[in-house]
Amino acid sequence: MKDLSINAGRLWHAIMETASFGRTAKGGICRLTLSDEDRQVRDWFVSACESLDCTVMIDEMGNIFARRSGKDNSRPPIAMGSHLDTQPSGGKFDGITGVLSGLEVLHTLNDAKYITNAPLELIDWTNEEGSRFNPPMLASGVFAGVFDRDFTYSREDCSGKRFGDELKRIGYLGKTKCGDHKLGAYFELHIEQGPVLENENKMIGVVTGVQGQRWYEITVIGRASHAGTTPMNLRRDAMLACARMVEAINAMALNHAPSAVSTVGLVDVKPNSRNVIPESVFFSVYLRHPNDTVLGDMDRELKEMVNTVAVNMNLQVKLENTWNSPSIKFDKECIEFVRNAAKNLGYSHRDIVSGAGHDTVYIARAVPTAMIFIPCENGISHNETEKTEPDQVAAGANVLLRTVVARDKARYEKAI
Ligand SMILES: [Zn+2]
């Protein structure tokens, strides 16, 4: 096992080759879920897996499972995977790195004629991004029992096309019931999508979980009046109230440093006229923290603060909590396999909590799960300029390889 090492050049070539499916003028990828480009990359992926003697199974959500036989195929497979869909102006590495590194792991094991005890599986999850069909992580959500199959089929894109119809159209509507297919463990390699590893000059992030998040929509209602004739002390300015709330929401995250983040990313002012004092402002709020207790404190602070500002300024306010995603802690044993693999390979590494959501948020509910992060330049992703170096991709894929093999040995062979 000590000699097992992935072929970095072959892996890099595969990433560059698949980047042609949906390539944009600026060198990124637009490969929306269940589009023709998604079909092209899926066809490429299926034939690549079959040429490695894997058996390909597609479930009713279009999730693709490529199985490499082990010594005992009655054992639940050890799985690797990620997603091949992208944002409309996505990059070449988000998701793709995880799937193609898994493919490279299978290729490496084939070359070495190494047969694991349990079978291995490589998975492409449908619609991780949620860009065309909202919400994100739909198919992994169905797999874990979070979403209902027919709810997912009924999701529509902005032109009114349904998820179920598009899945059928591209030829990836499988028969196997989603979630019936049991996995023994799941490991996902992904770019960090944040700047922490790069800043600390670390090669590998040992991901211990995913932070929790709460989404809100707030509407502040004041009174529209003439911007020239209404004295300052008689105004009920919804925009000013919004500005004070935005400032306080920012301070709230700073008060829970270093792990808390808060964002107001969408603001809609009415009537949005330069000569009218704003009557109402609608805005979104995201609060995120790895610890649900702190997130609960932030939730209370937000509600109190919003009420206080509204009362002080004689305005009305409506606050709606539209979505909660509790924090996820990955499986301790799986995390340990990742950490040991990074250590044994001599890569600099640190524990890290994922700031972004991933399919693992749902998979971890049903299967022992962990993730491996590698750096991306300036922490930028969901962007055509997204960039990760070949040696970083290779390091991540080698950690994935060692993790999977070590997990298989530890589980099924007494002496390691
Ligand atoms: Zn991703």
Image (cartoon, helix red, strand yellow):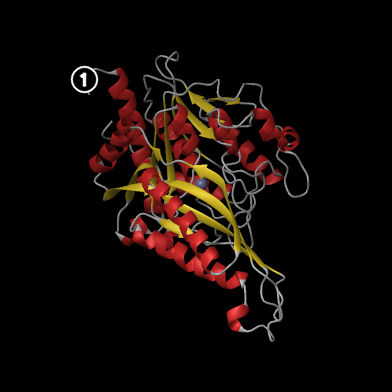
Q: Quadrant of residue 365?
A: top left
Q: Residue at x 68, y 41 (%)?
A: 34
Q: Left or right of 387: which side holds 173?
A: right
Residue at image position (46%, 56%) is: 304
Residue picked out by circle 1: 415
Q: Nearer the viewer, residue 61 or 147?
A: 147
Picture layout, residue 287 above or below residue 327: below
- In the rendered image, is residue 390 in sight? yes
Most extreme residue toward the right is: 160
> Is residue 355 in sight in this rendering?
no
* Amino acid of disc 1: Ala
Q: Position of residue 393 (x, y in %)?
A: 41, 49
Q: Nearer the viewer, residue 79 or 293?
A: 293
Q: Quadrant of the N terminus?
A: top left
Q: Position of residue 33 (x, y in %)?
A: 65, 43
Looking at the image, which residue is at 71% across and 81% down? 226
When asked about the image quadrant of residue 256, the answer is bottom left
Give the structural element (helix, strand or loop) at label 1. loop
